[in-house]
Image (cartoon, rainbow, N blue to C red):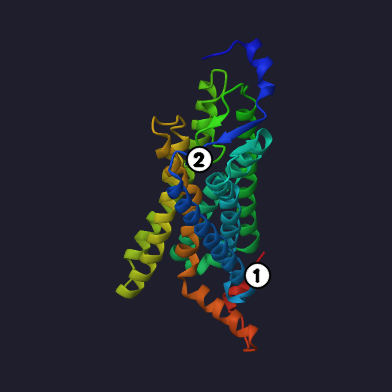
Amino acid sequence: MRYSYDTISANTSHIEEFILLGFSNFNSKLQLLLFTLFLLIYVFTILGNLTIITVATLDSLLHTPMYYFLRNLSFLEICYISVTLPKLLQTFVAKKKTIPFYGCCAQMYCFFTLGVTECFLLAVMAYDRFVAICNPLRYFSVMNKTTCLKMAAVSWVSGNVISLGQTASIFSLPYCGPNLINHFFCDIPPLLKLACTDVRAHEVSVSVTGFLVLPLPFSLVLYSYGRIIAAILRISTNTGRKKVFSTCASHFVSVTLFFGTGAFTYVRVKTSDTPDNDKILSLLYSVVTPLLNPLIYSLRNQEVKGGLRKILYKSVGIKDAKPSAQAHNFENSQ
């Protein structure tokens, strides 16, 4: 049913909150199982990323550009999963599954700020690996401290600016009922379905924005990893080739999962006829990726394991090793 402008103006103020349906169509036993599973995922994700931040901050050997960006990514992932998962956990156990109108607006803004920032940050990290592998002698001159700070700042500022524009656009629409969001957080596609006006222009805007912040950074990632693979093939020893390729392949799988599911959701925009499929896609980039990143990027990394051991040894009085020359060069580069 469509409404006239006068009807919309009269009823818009009636929408003071939305109801997040989440996975309420599942039976109570399955919801309890999912609550336990997602709670464990949330705890592990927070602890894993906090471990990376702590180790990379305290161990001077890890004061390098790669771990500087990993600290940014880990902080981002903690915020990213915390925007949606606590509310999802609430929908499993609480009878009242509502979120205030402005709370929904804040959730969308934070979610897309962090999501867009991650797109640019992953592209920056791929470039960092490209320089490290393809131009190792120039690595610390190219990726100096000032450059790293600027790259991280541009990623965060871009995420905030783009998210602010999209959120303001979506919540400027009239919402006069129903107020049922068939999702586990305030996402653009299900919200557009609730607007009491023609949303085709907004769908085009979201698709264009999605194309700019998903395929374009991903193209930079593809280029960087293409050059990296070419460099790997020139490594003379099989052991060295396998080690570098294994690391880059795991990074690329994580990046592809994030960009692929995000692009399918926001470049396509329209919610499918099976909303549960859209929810599963959203879980992949909003929950699974933050869970996998600590495992893929750092926790199986020997340098991080060594740094964690040194911190534990220091806590019981064993003297720490001296920082490497590479760490010193990055910390003092301008």
Residue 226 in percent (x, y) is at: 38, 54
Residue 259 in percent (x, y) is at: 45, 46
Closer to the eye: label 2 or 1:
2
Residue at (54, 14) in percent of width and height: 2
- The residue lying toward the viewer, choosing from 309 and 131, is 309
| Tag 2–tag 1 contact (CB < 8 Å) | no
Characterize the local packing of mark 2: few (<14), some (14-19) or many (20 or more) Cα atoms within 10 angstroms.
Answer: many
Q: Which mark is residue 299?
A: none
- The residue lying toward the viewer, choosing from 39 and 198, is 39
The answer, for residue 165, to whether it is visible in the render is: yes
The answer, for residue 127, to whether it is visible in the render is: no
- Three-letter residue code for mark 1: Glu
Characterize the local packing of mark 1: few (<14), some (14-19) or many (20 or more) Cα atoms within 10 angstroms.
Answer: some
Question: From what the image shows, is residue 228 above or below residue 91?
Answer: below
Residue 101 in percent (x, y) is at: 66, 33
Looking at this view, name the residue that lies furthest to the left.
238
Determine which residue is flagged by label 2: 22
Q: Quadrant of the C terminus?
A: bottom right
Whichever of callouts 2 and 1 sits on the residue coming sooner in the sequence is 2
Give the Cα separation between the discs numbered 2 and 1: 46 Å
- The residue lying toward the viewer, choosing from 32 and 307, is 32
- Three-letter residue code for mark 2: Gly
| Label 1 residue SS | helix
State which quadrant residue 144 falls in.
bottom right
Residue 180 in percent (x, y) is at: 55, 30
- The residue lying toward the viewer, choosing from 35 and 117, is 35
